[in-house]
Amino acid sequence: MKIFLEKLLWNSRYLTLLAVWSCVVGMALLFISSALDMGHLLIEFVNVEFLGHEYADGDFHTAVVSHVITAVDDFLLAIVLLIFALGVYELHIDKIEFARDSDTAGKLLQIESLDDLKDRLGKVILMILIVAFFKNVLHVTFDDPLNILYMGAGIFLISLALYFGHKAGSDH
C-alpha cells in the first residue's frame, strides 16, 4: 500500500503538464493576437498616412504609440508564460535536453530551481509593469502641478525598481 501511495504521489507531478500546456496555448494566443493587431495597425497606418483617410478617434500618433505599447506588453506577457511553462516542466517533469544542447537556448530558458524561476519571472513582470506605466503616461494631462509630481515620483520609483533588480541580479 505504501509503495502504491508513493508512486501515486510521485506521478501526480504530471498534473503540472496542465499548467505547462495551458501556458503554451496562452503564449501562442498572445503572440498571434498581438501580431495580428500590429498587422491591422499597419493597414490603418497606410490608410491614414499614405492614402489620406481620416482617423476618427482623435490623435493618430498617440493611438499608434498606444497600440505598439500594448503589443509590447502582450509580447512580454507571452514571454512570461513561456518562461513559466518551461520552468515548471523542468522543475517537475524532466530537464529539456534539446535546450541544454542548443546554442540558442541561452540561460534565460534554463531553470535550475524555484528561486531561479521566480527571479526570471520577476524581471519580466517588472518590465510589463514599466510598459503599462508608460502606456498610462500617454493619457496623463499636465494641467495640474500634482500630475507632474506624480509623474516624477512614478519615474523615480521605476528607476529604483530597475536599480535594485539589477543589483540583485548581479549578486548571483
Image (spheres, rainbow, N blue to C red):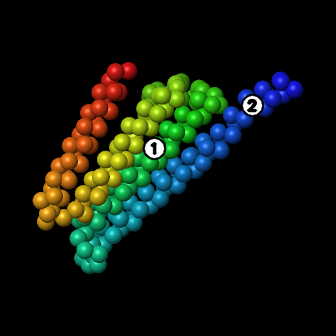
Identify which amino acid the numbered label 1 is placed on: Ile
Give left or right: position of 151 versus 4: left
Residue to which mark 1 is pinned:
79
Residue situated in front as seen by the camera: 154 or 22 = 154
Query: Which quadrant is the C terminus positioned in?
Result: top left
Identify which amino acid the numbered label 2 is placed on: Leu
Mark 1 or mark 2: whose residue is earlier in sequence: 2
Query: Circle 2 sits in a helix, a strand or a loop, which is it?
Result: helix
Residue 53 visible in image = no
Mark 1 or 2: in front is: 2
- Residue 40's place in the image compared with 87, above or below, is below
Residue 92: give x, y in percent of width and height.
Answer: 63, 31
Residue depicted at x 23% and y 48%: 154
Residue situated in front as seen by the camera: 52 or 142 = 142
Residue to which mark 2 is pinned:
9
Residue depicted at x 34% and y 61%: 67
